[in-house]
Amino acid sequence: MGRFVAILMGSSSDRDVMKRAEEELAEFGVEFETNVLSAHRKPEALVAYIKDASSRGAGVFICAAGMAAALPGVTAAHTSKPVVGVPIASGGLGGLDSLLAIVQMPPGVPVATVAVNGARNAALLAVQILASGDEDLAKRFEEFKRRQAES
Ligand code: RP5
């Protein structure tokens, strides 16, 4: 596997939303792998995975979590790769809880946060990040923008 996108989510209950990110990456022919690893429930396994994926060629991490959403921030703490955070609307607060938890990172540890349940934009942002070092992918993204404008 060359450069790939590592998709992480805090619970299998986040899968339905995150399918949209997988579909979008597949549309662009971008390789990805998906794992369920909670920052709160499986902290050691999460850190081991982040380090392993970073060394295997993960170019971007997409991390989705709901409620007290620590996953994107913890991932950003353990890798120097860019992290895109997807707040999931899974608790009683409709996703505002996870949005604030993910977007309010301290200076020095950025997480690029998309909209609540914004899995598709997370994938598009990951494609754009990878495309900065991949001319073919950059052309496919430009073509996507053209088609989107036309439709
Ligand atoms: C978060 O808590 C997960 O990302 C999920 O959105 C939420 C609820 O998890 P489950 O109780 O459904 O496993 O950590």
Image (cartoon, grey):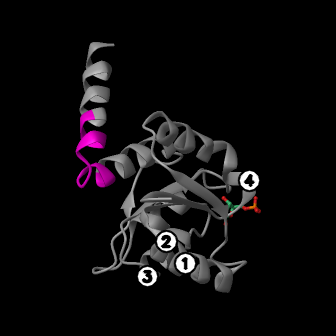
Q: Does label 4 or label 2 sit earlier along the sequence?
A: 4
Residue found farthest to the front:
1
Q: Identify the image quadrant of the C terminus.
A: top left
Q: Confirm or reject: label 4 Cβ below 8 Å from ligand 1.
A: yes
User: Magenta stretch?
Assistant: 129-139
Q: Nearer the viewer, residue 56 or 15?
A: 56
Q: How far apart, in angstroms, are the residues tagged by discs 4 and 1?
A: 24 Å
Q: Nearer the viewer, residue 128 or 151?
A: 128
Q: How far apart, in angstroms, are the residues tagged by discs 3 and 1?
A: 14 Å
Disc 4 designates what residue?
13
**Number of the front mark, 3 or 1:** 1
| Quarter of the rendered image showing ligand 1 | bottom right
Cβ atoms at labels 3 and 4 below 8 Å apart: no
Secondary structure of the residue carrying tag 3 is helix
Secondary structure of the residue carrying tag 2 is helix
Q: Answer few, some or many: residues within 10 Å of disc 3's Cα (few below 14, many 20 plus, some between 14 and 19).
A: some
Q: Answer few, some or many: residues within 10 Å of disc 2's Cα (few below 14, many 20 plus, some between 14 and 19).
A: few
Q: Residue sitting at 65 percent across and 62 percent down?
A: 35
Q: Residue sitting at 62 percent across and 63 percent down?
A: 67
Q: How far apart, in angstroms, are the residues tagged by discs 3 and 4?
A: 24 Å
Q: Does label 4 or label 1 sit earlier along the sequence?
A: 4
Is residue 79 shown above or below 17?
A: below
Check if residue 135 falls in the magenta segment: yes
Cβ atoms at labels 2 and 1 below 8 Å apart: yes
Q: Which mark is residue 77?
A: 3
Q: Which mark is residue 56?
A: 2
Mark yes or no: residue 66 visible: no
Is residue 66 shown above or below 147?
A: below
Disc 1 designates what residue?
52
Q: Does label 3 or label 2 sit earlier along the sequence?
A: 2
Q: Is residue 141 left or right of residue 47?
A: left
Q: Quadrant of residue 60?
A: bottom left
